[in-house]
Structure formats: C-alpha cells, structure tokens
Image: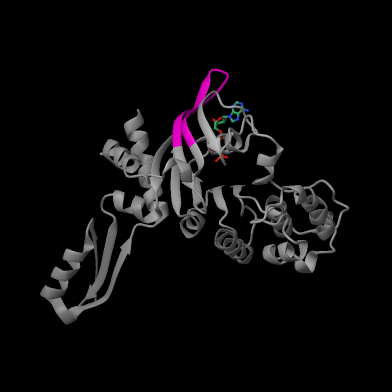
C-alpha cells in the first residue's frame, strides 16, 4: 500500500511548464563523505507559489535549501533557480534571492531602522522599472511590525523582534524568491499570526515565490499552496494539503450522537455514509461532525508508509 501512496503522490504532482519555473530541481543528489543524504530529489515551483518543505530531522531539508541558495555545492543533478545555476550565479542573481538567516546578532549597537536603510542601499542598483528596490524602509518596518522599534538598538530587541528583523533583512531587497528556514521558531502565537499575514502580503503584493521549511504542520497548512515531504533524502509527496489528505486512506471521521449515545465512524468517502445515516435515523441524529485528516495526520501516515516501502 505504501508503494501505491508513493507513486500516486509523485505522478499527480503538478506539472509546471518549464518557462514558468522559478525553481527547477532534477535528480539532485548530495553526498557528505561516503554518506548519501539526497537521493535524486526533483521538484519545481512556479512564480508566486508558497512551497513548504517538510520532513523529519535529518531528512535533507536544510541541505536542499542551501544548495538552492548557492551556499552549498551539490554532488550531482540539475538545479535552476531564477533561470540560473545557483552554484555559478553572480551578484545580480543573488540580489533577487532573499534568505532569512537565523538571528542577526552582529551590528548589535546599530538601530533597527539604520541597519535596514544601510542594507537596503546595496539593492538600489538592482532596481528595475517593474520592481523598485529596496523596500522603502518605513514601509518595510510597518510590514514586519517593527515601526515602534525603529530606533531600538539590535542588542536590545526581544527574541521575537529579532526574528522579525531577520525577516526584514531577508526581504529588504524585494526578492523575487525568498527562502525561509524555520521562520517562526521562537515566535509567540500573535507574532506567528502576523508573520503569516506578512507571507500572504508578500505573495499578493509582490508575487514573491517562497520556499520555507517548518516542523509546524499547522503553519504549513495555513501558508503553503503546495507541500513537499522529504524523507531520507527523497521526496515522498508533492501536492496541496487537501490533495495529500485525499491520498491517505480512511481519511474522514464522522461523529454523531443518537439517543444520547456518541458514535464515531471512519470512511474514505463520508458522503454516502452520512446520507445513509440520515435516511435511517433522520432527526434522531444530532451533533453531526465530519472531519478530514489534518496535515499532521496525513504527514505521519505518508512518512510511515514511505519508511515501510523504502526498506
Ligand atoms: N556538513 C555536513 N557534513 C556531513 N553531514 C552533514 C552535513 N550537513 C548535514 N549533514 C547530514 O545530512 C543529513 C541531512 O541534514 P539536513 O540538515 O539537511 O536535514 P534537515 O532535514 O534540515 O534536518 P532538521 O529538521 O534537523 O533541520 C543529516 O543526516 C545530517 O547529519
């Protein structure tokens, strides 16, 4: 069964015409010493898409992202990002790519606004008619929620504010493509929600393509147009959260009460079951609830199935 889930996942992955691919990865392999950690990874992203790369610890997410960012040399495979090979691309390419690194701790004595204005200057020469660069600093402060902290020295920012500054630094050049490696670690729920709004704004306003990694499946479900699951250096699923949920058998849970008694039933297709239930019991059915697998359940199942079929 695991094998079928796997094949199904890959075959029905979206087909993106080559000229619309902001990211195009084919048969990417990575070996550290004698250890293979990526075994032929292939996927693509189209402009304006938000992709979440999920997978257990050690699956190869950071390695993949670092290769796409041009920070790590791959062992083999074809990688095209914004039309260029990241291993060979130059400064104009880098200016179009945003990277959010973990906590910007240098320049502790600088004020937030001052640092962003300074870093933004670098991007001025890469402005185009369609895309003025950098973000005007006050708009940027507003968009990441740091207006009130504009004059605060970096060393005095709270953990959450620092992560927002990391994001601001990643997008100051108005990148066409943004990489976010576990962007909301350390955020409180309010900051997390604001960050999600920011991601939506970036894709709405700027058509920014975003590739993010996260272990927060709720976050992936809220943000991503498409989910890629990497396990043991292989992509084991590629599709929207709904598509992946549909691929996992026994997906829906139907709950109801009748004569004061609770009932639970699992069904791949809940509609005929519910219809029959109402035909049989009509008004006696109360508190009817149909719940599809959430991404967490789907993810656990897909990872589990792939491990079964890989060995
Ligand atoms: N520089 C390196 N040298 C040798 N092995 C490495 C190196 N970097 C990563 N690895 C190994 O490669 C594998 C994939 O690591 P990677 O960091 O890409 O995984 P990940 O999916 O990002 O994990 P996590 O969720 O824990 O961040 C791991 O087994 C890791 O130990």
Q: As drawn, is 114 to the left or to the right of 245?
A: right
Question: Looking at the image, is 214 positioned above or below residue 262?
Answer: above
Q: Can residue 2 be found in the magenta stretch?
A: no
For this orientation, the residue located farthest to the front is 129
Of the 4 image quadrants, the one containing the C terminus is top left
Extent of the magenta region: 25-42
Q: Tell me what residue is drawn at x 40 percent, y 48 percent.
A: 299
Q: Tell me what residue is drawn at x 79 percent, y 50 percent.
A: 119
Q: Nearer the viewer, residue 36 or 96?
A: 96
Q: Determine the quadrant in which ligand 1 lies.
A: top right
For this orientation, the residue located farthest to the right is 109
Numbered circles on residues, count? 0
The colour style of the image is one colour
Q: Nearer the viewer, residue 55 or 141?
A: 141
Q: Can residue 35 be found in the magenta stretch?
A: yes
Q: Quadrant of residue 12?
A: top left
Q: Tell me what residue is drawn at x 58 percent, y 19 percent.
A: 33
Of the 4 image quadrants, the one containing the N terminus is top left
Residue 253 visible here? yes
Residue 272: x %, y % from top left? 16, 64
Residue 83: x %, y % from top left? 56, 38
Question: Looking at the image, is 55 positioned above or below residue 280?
Answer: above
For this orientation, the residue located farthest to the left is 280
Residue 192: x %, y % from top left? 60, 61
Residue 182 visible here? no
Q: Nearer the viewer, residue 289 or 245?
A: 245
For this orientation, the residue located farthest to the bottom is 283
Residue 148: x %, y % from top left? 78, 69
The main secondary structure of the magenta stretch is strand
């Amino acid at each position: 069964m695991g094998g079928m889930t796997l094949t199904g996942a890959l075959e029905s992955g979206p087909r993106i015409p080559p000229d619309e691919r902001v990211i195009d990865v084919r048969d990417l392999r990575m070996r550290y010493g004698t250890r293979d950690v990526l075994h032929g990874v292939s996927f693509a992203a189209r402009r304006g898409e938000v992709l979440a790369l999920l997978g257990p610890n050690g699956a190869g997410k950071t390695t993949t992202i670092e290769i796409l960012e041009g920070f790590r040399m791959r062992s083999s495979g074809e990688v095209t990002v914004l039309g260029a090979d990241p291993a060979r691309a130059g400064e104009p390419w880098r200016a179009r790519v945003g990277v959010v690194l973990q906590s910007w701790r240098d320049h502790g004595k600088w004020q937030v606004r001052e640092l962003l204005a300074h870093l933004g200057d670098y991007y001025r020469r890469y402005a185009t008619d369609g895309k003025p660069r950098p973000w005007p600093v006050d708009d940027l402060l507003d968009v990441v929620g740091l207006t009130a902290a504009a004059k605060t020295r970096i060393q005095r920012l709270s953990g959450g504010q620092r992560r927002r500054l990391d994001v601001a630094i990643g997008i100051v050049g108005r990148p066409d493509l943004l990489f976010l490696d576990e962007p909301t670690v350390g955020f409180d729920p309010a900051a997390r929600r604001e960050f999600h709004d920011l991601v939506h704004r970036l894709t709405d306003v700027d058509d920014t393509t975003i590739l993010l990694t996260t272990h927060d499946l709720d976050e992936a479900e809220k943000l991503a147009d498409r989910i890629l699951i990497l396990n043991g250096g292989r992509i084991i699923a590629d599709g929207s959260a709904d598509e992946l949920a549909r691929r996992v058998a026994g997906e829906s849970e139907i709950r109801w009460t009748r004569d004061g008694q609770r009932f639970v039933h699992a069904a791949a297709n809940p509609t005929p079951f519910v219809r029959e239930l109402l035909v049989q019991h009509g008004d006696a059915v109360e508190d009817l609830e149909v719940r599809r697998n959430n991404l967490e359940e789907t993810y656990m199942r897909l990872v589990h199935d792939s491990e079964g079929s890989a060995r």
